[in-house]
Amino acid sequence: MEKKYGRPVSEWLELVRASPLARHMELVSWLKAEYGLGHGHANALVAHVLAGGK
C-alpha cells in the first residue's frame, strides 16, 4: 500500500480512526473518493480499525 498510495499503513489507519464517520461503508467510500484507494484496500483498513485493531 505504501508504494501504491504513498503512505504507510499506520498513517492510513490513523486517518480512519480520526474520521468523524463511523459506518463501515461510509468510511470505505470516503477513502475511495478522497484518497483514491481501491475498494479492497479501503475495506481492509476500515475492517481492521472497526474490529479494534491497533
Image (cartoon, rainbow, N blue to C red):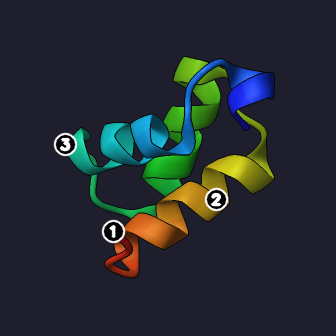
Q: Which one is earlier in the sequence, the residue at label 3 or at label 1? A: 3
Identify the residue at the far bottom of this view. Answer: 51
Q: Does the CB distance between marks 3 and 2 fall below 8 Å? A: no
Task: Identify residue type, mark 2.
Answer: Asn
Q: Which mark is residue 31?
A: none
Percent coordinates x, y for residue 23 in the rendering? 36, 63
Question: How far apart, in angstroms, are the residues tagged by discs 2 and 1?
Answer: 16 Å
- Residue at screen point 55% across, 34% down: 8
Q: Is residue 51 left or right of residue 6?
A: left
Percent coordinates x, y for residue 10 in the rendering? 44, 44
Q: Which mark is residue 20?
A: 3
Quadrant containing the C terminus is: bottom left
Question: How far apart, in angstroms, are the residues tagged by discs 3 and 2?
Answer: 17 Å
Percent coordinates x, y for residue 40 in the rendering? 78, 55
Q: Is residue 48 left or right of residue 29?
A: left
Numbered disc 3: secondary structure: loop
Instruction: Say which residue label 1 marks.
Output: 54
Task: Identify residue type, mark 1.
Answer: Lys
Numbered disc 2: secondary structure: helix
Question: How far apart, in angstroms, are the residues tagged by discs 3 and 1?
Answer: 18 Å
Percent coordinates x, y for residue 20 in the rendering? 19, 42
Q: Which one is earlier in the sequence, the residue at label 2 or at label 1? A: 2
Residue 11 location, quadrant: top left
- Residue at screen point 64% across, 33% down: 32
Task: Identify residue type, mark 3.
Answer: Pro
Instruction: Say which residue label 2 marks.
Output: 43
Which numbered disc, 3 or 1, marks the residue closer to the eye? 1
- Residue at screen point 27% across, 50% down: 17
Please tell me how crowded label 1 is: few (under 14), some (14-19), or many (20+) other residues with Cα within 10 Å: few
Q: Which one is earlier in the sequence, the residue at label 3 or at label 2? A: 3
As rendered, which of 28 and 6 lies closer to the eye? Answer: 6
